[in-house]
Amino acid sequence: MHETDMSPHTTSIVPMVAARRRRGASGWTHAPQVIYELLTGHHVDLRERVFALLSEPLFVTNPYDSFHALRENTLARLKRFSEAHFFSTIDYVRDPLKFAAAVECLAFLDYNLSIKAGVHFTLCGGTVAKLGTRKHHEEFIPRLDSCDLPGCFGMTELGHGSNVSGIETSAEYDPSTESFVINTPNDAASKFWIGGAAQHGKLCTVFAQLTTQGTAQGVHVFAVRIRDDDGRVVPGVRIEDCGHKMVLNGVDNGRIWFQNLKVPRDALLDKMAQVDRDGTYSSPIANKSTRFGVMIGGLIVGRLLIAQGAVDASKVALAIAIRYSRSRPQFGDRIVMDYVTHQRRLLVPLSNVYALGFALLDVKRMHARGDAGESRLVHERSCGLKALATWSRVETMQYCRECCGGQGYLTANQICVFKTDMDVDVTFEGDNTVLMQQTARPLITAAAKNAGSMLSPPATGHGGGCPIRRAQALMDFRTDALARQAHVEIARAGGDEAAMNQNLDIVIDVGHASMEAFALRCFTDAAASVVDAAPREPLMTALRLYAASRLERATKFYLEYGAMRASEAAQVRKDVNSLCGELVSSRQLELLVEGFGLPECAIRAPIAKDWRALGRS
Amino acid sequence: MHETDMSPHTTSIVPMVAARRRRGASGWTHAPQVIYELLTGHHVDLRERVFALLSEPLFVTNPYDSFHALRENTLARLKRFSEAHFFSTIDYVRDPLKFAAAVECLAFLDYNLSIKAGVHFTLCGGTVAKLGTRKHHEEFIPRLDSCDLPGCFGMTELGHGSNVSGIETSAEYDPSTESFVINTPNDAASKFWIGGAAQHGKLCTVFAQLTTQGTAQGVHVFAVRIRDDDGRVVPGVRIEDCGHKMVLNGVDNGRIWFQNLKVPRDALLDKMAQVDRDGTYSSPIANKSTRFGVMIGGLIVGRLLIAQGAVDASKVALAIAIRYSRSRPQFGDRIVMDYVTHQRRLLVPLSNVYALGFALLDVKRMHARGDAGESRLVHERSCGLKALATWSRVETMQYCRECCGGQGYLTANQICVFKTDMDVDVTFEGDNTVLMQQTARPLITAAAKNAGSMLSPPATGHGGGCPIRRAQALMDFRTDALARQAHVEIARAGGDEAAMNQNLDIVIDVGHASMEAFALRCFTDAAASVVDAAPREPLMTALRLYAASRLERATKFYLEYGAMRASEAAQVRKDVNSLCGELVSSRQLELLVEGFGLPECAIRAPIAKDWRALGRS
């Protein structure tokens, strides 16, 4: 397995993309194949078919496209993707893993298309699929599937992003005409950042405060036509373009005002709440707050897709940066990857990509099982992983870009494109600091209950010599101890929301710590499931690197809480460096990059191939 | 001074820009004025005149400009700026602070223009001014001043960025024609990333290996015409466009090959080395390595300008993000700035901007003094501060963008424009990891000499109760201890370059630690020079926040080295939070933002004014 005579300089692009093409072949292609299928987890063949479509010239973006050409080309790409019918919008509820697999493929290539598709299929389509009933499905699903009816998701308002329950758009039922009247009461209540609204959107799932028979029933969702079949904005709707964004201009974000817009009673997506002809309101969910949770629950899939997109695009950026760093000489014979500063900036994120990938897979499978008893956990973990994965992506992309020097800044080399296009992911579909609170709050509440009992750091010998067990124990302790600290500090400051806000830094740390501990557990389980030594060895090294690097980042905590001695802290740094060294000096790093199973169409960067030939293509 | 009845909601844009307009006026404008002049340090009136010019409509960028329109408009802006003759290129050596003051103004508005001007005036012009002699000054300076002869800086090659002494472009002296023959021996030796080369550059300062009379004399610089007065590429020169960069496309980066290009003997910038008619080489600097240092010494000013640009653009981004965060409600009556997570992300960087600003001012003044005995220190500190300031900018801009949610992503709100345009600053004019080594190496060498003596952490009572003195002692100890650790680890690993590379993570930490300690010292001195309580109070709070936040970031080190107890580590976090609270709950934050003295033309973001009116303009 270890072809030690293979110099890193001869690393070629071929193995990386060949893994999936040599299924079942023996020899060294076997290991990347095992790793790829383990990390990807499901619908490997479907992905293959999607990537085949994405190899068409239509999907090659042109950086010289104008603002408007980029929008039109992104729509054309979405239509082509839709027409291939890899899935139906109804799979959002019927076969969520299939739905996810197809949509996930887009983030490897083009975040404009990924988000345009995400808005259309996941947010708009998913809401219709989940909150709508048969009549909505019959009317809209076929036209969403074909993208004949481009969708928008009308939740966010200019004055209300994170505070969805505080939105002000109103929908009042009028029994005399059997219709809802939708209004935007003020400018701050205009729908803002609505992807697809500026130019292409025809159907919008509008979130509004429902009032019927004089009673406010909270936020409900309506399927509203904002443009007719010919693309003309309908009367009662006013739309403005949000204008130029720094990047991601393939998504046409717009602002919407409603003025006495009459929509039929059937516009209400009525699976979870109904309004009779006479205006009588009913819902199978008695509790108003639970009902609200269901209304916005559709965001879970969106968050998982965004988190997965962050991980998948990081794979592409890392593959490019690692390849370049192994071929670019520096000061004579050395290559830039010889420097430990390069190794740390690229290989720690590589291990993190694996950890996050396995954690996301766990949550996606849990979501697909649809067990009601697990729904809180799915919510908490999808929030936390979305925040962790996107913040990690920010860091990873920055490192990849810096490790490639000026080349990382060139559009043709892709890294900077992902880095800038994706920057929005840390605040959309829930601001990360808000999402981390969703993850942390139940842990803090639980810590409050156990506040009476002692909490001691794991003993030094706890892991029985196994660095992973030791790391898991330390990371679990960190989560518990921080949750308890947060509880104590909040209680000491008065115990109210203001006290929470004053200690939000620790609250965020709790969410962060818990998600890292969860990811380590998922990574450990995944690696343990591999029997063959060839794929197992690189996975184990990456696992140990992930564990050591997480401990290193939180050394401050472990020292402060007496969970680590200074000598162990010093050793953790050395472990990270030596694990990086182990990866680069063996075939393991290559196997891990090949294990991403990146499709050929996703790697166009000249520096990932032959940087000396740059500009010769 | 403390108008406690003033709600943060009523914060207006006016005071921020009014500070410089009410010079000497009494009352509350006095404090921002004192702070502004202290932080800016020199040529306040000249800056005022530059900002007046930059208020012309020509300098308002249009995000919808095409790739080529942006390039042409950037050139037109550079020409207008040049024609105003705020300074002469020769001021690079004659009056460096004046030169810097004028060029620095550009980074507040437009990084495209800032870099286009930096390449022309600082890199190309500065090299002609510094390494050229009277004949070069007479021929080129007037045409550089007017931008009649746009300049390029031909140092970097495709295969050689950081390793300047390893460049391969050759310049061989031919006594028969009294000319140098310049050649690009292979594709990796082509000049790459050369700003201005793709379209506009006419004069290029070319770095090449000089050979005369069969002897290689190392890297020397030649003033070479790459285009004639009509803009046609001259024979012997081949140029390709580097193509689309993710951003900063107003700078036309190109790639240059030379093929037997004959340039006259006078093309050699010959202040530091001369070649006689017959080819006899002479230089006042006997030592080859010292001579090389002088040849590339011109980068110092470029680095200081880049560092200052990072600090100044951070001021604009912070001002916008802070203003928005104080006016944007969240969940009812609260504003987003009420959350400690917002306060930390914006106010710690604010304190850092002050610290870095004072540190840069110190180094700029030292450079302007031109004392040969200080030249090593100027080099080391300009390298370290460039790295620290630009890495800080990456973090600051990311926080500013995230704290504004989606609004931070809109081009009109400026933050994302700075954030993406400036991303190149961490690797150009010296990769930050390489630059930090320049700062760290002499400290490690010094530590090796003192390796025999004991190094103990400062005693807990050391600061005599003064948190700044305590912080300074801790930060100085950190620098020394890390330098010693780096020495020990490198020695243990064999003491050679490979051992250095394996421990480069600590080496970088040494540079980082030393620059932070230096910045604290400069900030302390600056604050101490202020007598009046009104400006002194906010400066002291910012100083304490800077000190506490630096300790907090390095708590891991202090605990590991026994310099801090767990209780002090816990207290440091609380200090950071309470200092943030002190700033937001008083007029101090406003005074510090006003103290940036931002010109009106630099703040166009709707969210810095009235976010509810967004899109109404």
Image (tube, coloured by chain):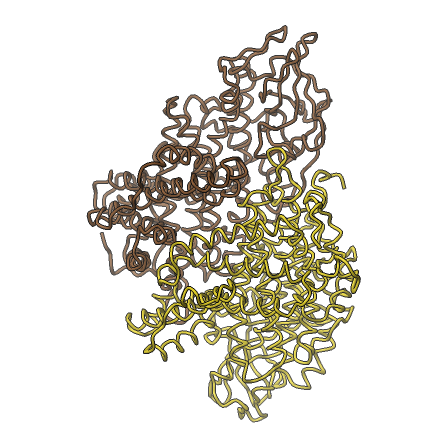
Chain colours: A brown, B yellow
Instruction: Examine the rendered structure and indicate whether residue A293 appears above or below residue A76.
Output: above
Occupied quadrant, residue B600:
bottom right
Q: Would residue B187 be seen by someone viewing this image from the given angle?
A: no
- Of A120 and A424, nearer the camera is A424
Q: Position of residue A83 (x, y in %)?
A: 51, 28
Q: Quadrant of the N terminus of chain B?
A: bottom right
The residue shown at (38%, 47%) is A352
Instruction: Examine the rendered structure and indicate whether residue B523 appears above or below residue A395.
Output: below
Q: Position of residue A176 (x, y in %)?
A: 70, 7
- Of A169 and A590, nearer the camera is A169
Q: Position of residue A299 (x, y in %)?
A: 50, 30
Instruction: Examine the rendered structure and indicate whether residue A381 appears above or below residue A503.
Output: above
Q: Position of residue A546 (x, y in %)?
A: 33, 49
Q: Would residue B250 be seen by someone viewing this image from the given angle?
A: yes
- Of A76 and A120, nearer the camera is A120
Farthest top residue?
Answer: A278
